[in-house]
Image (cartoon, coloured by chain):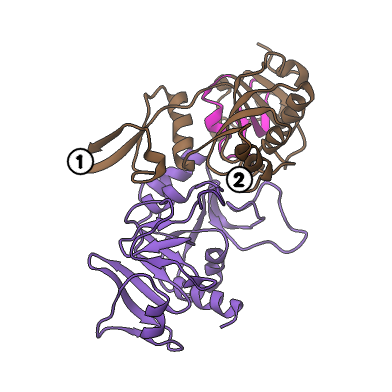
Amino acid sequence: MDKATIRATIANRVAKEFKDGDLVNLGIGLPTEVANYVPEDIDVTFQSENGFIGMGPAPEAGQEINNLTNAGGLPVTIFKDAAFFDSAMSFAIIRGGHLDCTVLGALQVDAKGNLANWMIPGKKVPGMGGAMDLVTGAKKVIVAMEHTAKGDVKILSECNLPLTAVGVVDLIVTEMAVMKVTDKGLKLIEINPEFTVEEVQAVTGAQLIVEDDLIDMK
Amino acid sequence: MKKISTVEQAIANLKDGMTLMVGGFLGVGAPELLIDAIIEKGIKDLTVICNDTSFPDKGVGRLVAHQLVKKVITSHIGTNVETGKQMHDGSLEVVLSPQGTIAEQIRAAGAGLGGVITPTGVGTVVEEGKETIELNGRKYLVELPLKADVAIIQANVSDHKGNLVYDLSARNFNPLMAMAADLVIVEANKIVESGQLDPNFVHTPHIFVDKIVEGGKNG
């Protein structure tokens, strides 16, 4: 699979998790692309943690407004029913359980639902930004990422990078599969028919639970 | 009390070593003229509280790039190579904290609360050295209020009294910081006569504002 296909596959699948009326926060990078795949028959509101709900797509060239950016600092648009607020309100929404879903990338994620996505000691220390609050407060936490990092395993039995939060991840969506975090471990619930279970397991550092209800990736 | 002043008058009492809050989110909603003036005057050894350290050429990031900051409490430094560089060579102390926690710590200081009890950061390095408490079976971190000597913030419109209205996503930390410092200086894109703002739609009431300077670099 080429990069564009991988990203489209993941973004398209994540968008199927949303329900009509959901408030959703999308992380920087691949998660942002999920907005392009939301089914037209449902109404989803996007939150931007720098202080508004009702975020729309990027503006046409020349239509950018300096004071209207997403949490990555990139120009965005808003829908007519958007609302702005300060950072305390923004994180009250996030932490207070008012956010139905957050979609983030990960450096590592493990079978217990632990997430590491904010630093690599000695190498890269960008900071956690709003990620710790998002995964702690959102009703549903979806990790959307490529299954491996240039071949390195990212889905593990236990993360070894500093954690963003403990036991918060609900669903992992990659180009190969959809995995659910359960009390017993990671359950493979959907698989991209281009791959076999053995192929997915070979690049996964945690034992996948495979049962009869495994279906093709939606 | 006359609050409108020149940039020079507004920052006249800023001194080396002070704790300074700076509004803005990746530079959006940052008081650029006030930052210019601090750089010009070379006020240094600052402890800065801000959401992120922006970019080397934008907002609070410029204070870092000019090596005027000795300690920064922030949630994100990834867009400013200068912050990373100074952190590694030991000239800048960086305290990273979750964004929602910093927002609420600032609000707590302004609201007279003794701290914030938050589930964010439990089980991570953020927990290290902090008091934890368990309430109704859930573990929380106790985060103390964040207060500053001076807050420099940015608004879209201020009236002569200091009632403020922000613009779009430039609001972010500005209203919170307005509540949490001994001296609050606002840089407003536009200053209007009292009575020109609809009291129903004032974002920050004037009692929090000490000095108003006319800006114009934002928005």
Q: Mark 1 lies on which chain?
A: B
The chain displayed purple equals A
Q: Describe residue A138's horizontal placement relative to residue A106 as left or right.
A: left
Residue A129 lies, in percent from the top left, at 52, 46
User: What stretch of residues is rendered in magenta?
Assistant: B153-182
The quarter of the image holding the C terminus of chain A is bottom left
Q: Where is residue B104 in the image (x, y as percent from the top left)?
A: 44, 35
Question: Residue at horizontal 39%, vertical 87%?
Answer: A196
Q: How many residues crowd mark 1 within 10 Å: few (<14), some (14–19), many (20+)?
A: few
Residue A1 lies, with reference to residue A120, above or below; the image says: below
Specify the amino acid type for callout 2. Ser
The alpha-carbon separation of the residues under discs 1 and 2 comes to 36 Å
Let me know if residue B5 is in the magenta part. no
Question: What letter labels the chain drawn in brown?
Answer: B
Q: Is mark 1 on a helix, strand or loop?
A: loop
Q: Nearer the viewer, residue A129 or A63?
A: A129
Question: Vertical placement of A149 versus B101: above or below?
Answer: below
- Mark yes or no: residue A177 visible: yes
Q: Earlier in the sequence, mark 1 or mark 2?
A: 1
Whether residue B158 appears in magenta in the rendering, the answer is yes
The residue that appears at 67% across and 16% down in the rendered structure is B15
Q: Specify the label residue B169 is tagged with.
A: 2
